[in-house]
Amino acid sequence: MNDFYELGTREKPLPAPAHVVWESLHEPQRPSARAWLHLGRGEVEPRVIEAEEPHVVVWSSLWADRPEDVIRLDVRPDRQGSLLRFTWSSPELLVEAEDLGWHRHRLNKLFFGDLRSSYGQ
């Protein structure tokens, strides 16, 4: 991801073990999984463009109007589950601070709200 700008990153704990979180990120729509990836308006299903089990998954963009963006997801074990860090990058900067904030908020909700809830918390 040379010449990409980091537009947002955050790391927080999740209650599930690292290998479970990695599976959730690697195959978010698999039939046996709890549904957590609910796309909003203007969002598209991400593709896995890189994966290193059990620690890294890189997604294509979630947003139809930002097709070159990528979301790197790093998972590592923690004492009570795992730590997940997302890093959202793009070859172009967002100009509007409001857009930047909205996209960051959406990623926070997706991973630390919806995904967390799928583990029962």
Image: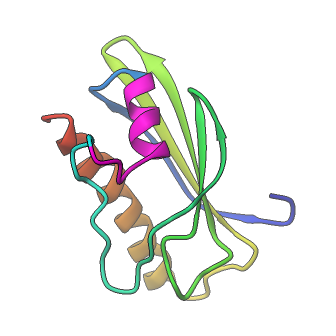
Residue 112 horizontal side relative to residue 90, left or right: left
Q: How is the image coloured?
A: rainbow
Name the side, left or right, on which 61 lies relative to 14: right
Residue located 42% across and 17% down the image: 78
Q: For the magenta stretch, what is the residue range?
A: 19-31
Which of the 4 image quarters holds residue 57? top right
- Along the line of sight, the residue nearer the viewer: 12 or 118: 118
Residue toward you, 102 or 113: 113
Q: Looking at the image, which residue sits at the far front?
A: 31
Residue 26 coordinates in the image, percent (x, y): 49, 44
| Image x and y of residue 81, in percent | 33, 20
In the displayed structure, 5 sits above or below 94; it is above
In the image, what residue occupies the spot 44% across and 24% down? 19
Can you give x and y, in whole percent of width and height, for residue 109 in the image? 29, 58
Answer with left or right where residue 37 lies relative to residue 72.
left
- In this image, 111 relative to 64: left or right? left
The image shows a total of numbered marks equal to: 0
State whether residue 16 is above or below residue 56. above
Farthest residue to the right: give it.
2
| Residue ranking furthest to the left | 120
- Hey, which quadrant is residue 88 in on the image? bottom right
| Quadrant of image for the N terminus | bottom right
**Is residue 23 located in the magenta-colored stretch of the structure?**
yes
> Split into 4 quadrants, where in the image is the C terminus?
top left
Q: Residue at x 50, y 65 (%)?
A: 46
- The overriding secondary structure of the stretch rendered in magenta is helix
Q: Position of residue 24 (x, y in %)?
A: 38, 41
Q: Is residue 55 above or below residue 58?
A: above
Residue under the point 44% across and 44% down: 25
Indicate whether residue 73 is drawn in magenta. no
